[in-house]
Amino acid sequence: MPYQYECSNGDCRFLVRSSSSEEVHRLVRAHVRTVHRGRIASVDLEREIERVELA
């Protein structure tokens, strides 16, 4: 079952989906750092990553 993250910062349309939770964590951290010039706490990242079922 894949993992998914959608950025909830303003009008940002960033979405990542992968079968690897490590890859999602890495890409989300890179996104937040480069696009929003910030950091995301591990606890917030875990809370916002979803497990999704593909049709």
Image: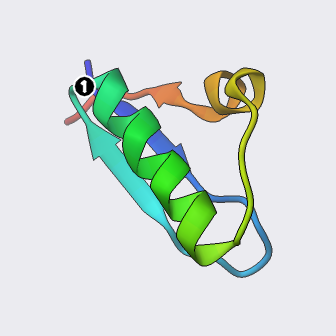
Amino acid type indicated by mark 1? Ser
Position of 5 relative to 33 (above/below): above
Query: Callout 1: few (<14), some (14-19), or many (20+) C-alpha neighbours within 10 Å?
Result: few
Residue 30 is situated, as x and y percent measured from the top left of the image, at: 47, 56
Question: Relative to 49, is 19 on the left or the right?
Answer: left
Quadrant of the rendered structure where residue 47 is?
Answer: top right
On the image, the x and y values in percent for residue 1 come to: 25, 18
Q: Position of residue 41 (x, y in %)?
A: 75, 33
Residue bearing the label numbered 1: 20
3 relative to 12, above or below:
above
Question: How many badges with numbers are in the image?
Answer: 1
Q: What residue is rendered at 52% in x and 28% in y?
A: 50
Judged left or right of residue 40, residue 32 is left
Query: Secondary structure beneath disc 1?
Result: loop
x 53%, y 48%: residue: 29
Q: Is residue 6 above or below residue 20?
A: below
Along the horizontal axis of the image, is 25 left or right of 6?
Answer: left
**Closest to the observer: 53 or 20?**
20
Q: Give 46 or 42, whichever is nearer the viewer.
A: 42
Residue 55 lies in what quarter of the image? top left
Indicate the position of residue 52 as horizontal and vertical percent values: 38, 28
Q: Nearer the viewer, residue 28 or 51?
A: 28
Residue, far bottom:
11
Give me the residue at 75% from left, 21% from top: 43
Residue 38 in the image: above or below residue 22: below
- The residue shown at (69%, 72%) is 36
* 49 sits left or right of 20 in the view: right
